[in-house]
Image: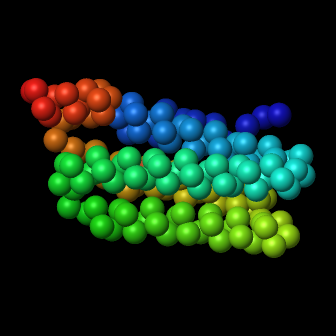
Amino acid sequence: MQPFMEWSDNLNIGIDTIDLQHRKIVDYINELYRATQENDRELVGKVLQGLIEYTSSHFGFEEEMLESNGYADLEEHKKLHQNFIERIKKHLDNHEKGANVARALTGELQIWLIAHISKEDQLYVPSLVTPPTGSVLTKMINKFFG
Ligand SMILES: [Fe+2]
Ligand SMILES: [Fe+2]
């Protein structure tokens, strides 16, 4: 089956760890699409649950990185993350009540993710202490020993 959404290199923000995490979210969206196409309601629920957990940990990672860099718009960025998680949770809730949410949701997720990465995530890149040429690990090493 063709994936619903393919990673495009212009979605890379240039920080390896973050780019990998964003790709993984795309994998979840594709998995959700597959579950929907196969009419596998149980799988839809599992994937949504996994998506919530994975995305929350990505958001936590990103927020910690922004906090340690003193990012000025951190609170606003956090709010966007929170709203997103709440929305997926609501969809999962509706799914559990028997609604057919996944088909519309895959499109919504795709639009949200692309917009968030290319606008809000892209925005914080210049404010990171070390230029985004390497991984976060490299950044951290540079920060402490550079
Ligand atoms: Fe973000
Ligand atoms: Fe992100």
**Picture quarter with the N terminus:** top right
Which residue is rendered at x = 20% and y = 61% of the image? 72
Q: Position of residue 8 (x, y in %)?
A: 54, 35
User: Which residue is nearer to you in this view: 45 or 109?
Assistant: 45
Q: Position of residue 58 (x, y in %)?
A: 46, 47
Residue 142 appears left or right of 14: left
Which residue is rendered at x = 19% and y = 28% of the image? 141
Residue 135 appears left or right of 47: left
Numbered marks: total: 0
User: Which residue is nearer to you in this view: 113 or 42?
Assistant: 42
**Picture quarter with the C terminus:** top left
Query: Taking the image as drawn, is residue 110 in sight?
Result: no
In the image, residue 56 sits, relative to residue 77, either above or below, namely: above
In the image, residue 82 sits, relative to residue 17, either above or below, namely: below
Q: Position of residue 59 (x, y in %)?
A: 43, 53
* Location of residue 90 by image quarter: bottom right
Which residue is rendered at x = 25% and y = 26% of the image? 138
Which residue is rendered at x = 62% and y = 64% of the image? 88
